[in-house]
Image (cartoon, grey):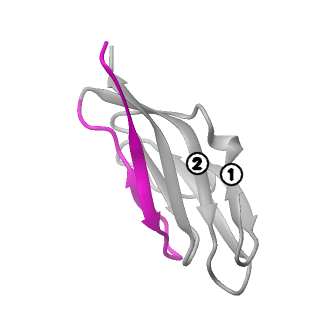
Amino acid sequence: MAVNWKPLAQSVLSGTAAAIYSPAAGKQGAVHSANAWNPTAAPVTVNVYLVPGAGTAGDATRVLQVAVPAGKSLPLTDILNLKIVNPAALFADGNGVTLTITGAEADAS
C-alpha cells in the first residue's frame, strides 16, 4: 500500500459548509495536523463535518465545533487521526477563517 504525505486542504472558509477534501477513487485519507487561523476582528465558529457519499453537512455529520478567537490560530487536535474513506468527504464552514489540514493519503484495501 503506497502512502503519500501531503496537504489535504487549505482554504478560506465561508459561512456555508463546503467540501474541502475528498479522497480520489480507491484512496483514503488521514488527518495528521489541522490548524485554523482567524484574521478577522471577531471570534468565528468553525465546524468540520465528515460527510458520507451523497450526504450533507449538518448536526448528524459534525465532528468538530470550535470558536477561533479574533486574530488567533488554533490547532484542531480533535480531528487528528480522522480517517476519510472514499466516497466520504470533509466539509467545513467558518466565515473568513483559513483552514489548513495535512496528512496522508493511501490506497484503500
- Residue receiving disc 2: 34
Query: Image point 35% across, 24% down: which residue?
Result: 106
Residue at mark 1 to residue at mark 2: CA–CA distance: 6 Å
Give 50 or 2, whichever is nearer the viewer: 2
Query: Image point 33% across, 37% down: which residue?
Result: 87
Three-letter amino acid code of the residue under disc 1: Pro
Q: Quadrant of the N terminus?
A: top left
Label 1: state its secondary structure: strand
Label 2: state its secondary structure: strand
Query: Image point 25% across, 26% down: which residue?
Result: 26
Give 77 or 27, whichever is nearer the viewer: 77
**Quick check: is 64 in the magenta stretch?**
no
Three-letter amino acid code of the residue under disc 2: Ala
Q: How many residues crowd around disc 2 within 10 Å: few (fewer than 14), some, or many (20 or more)?
A: many
**Quick check: is 2 in the magenta stretch?**
yes
Left of 5 or right of it: where is 63? right
Residue 74 at x, y = what percent? 70, 58
Residue 79 at x, y = what percent? 63, 42
For the residues labelled 1 and 2, say whether their Cβ atoms are less than 8 Å apart.
yes
Residue stretch rendered in magenta on the structure: 1-25
Residue 70 at x, y = what percent? 73, 78
Query: Considering only order in the chain, which callout, 2 or 1, is on the residue closer to the N terminus?
Result: 2
- Residue receiving disc 1: 75
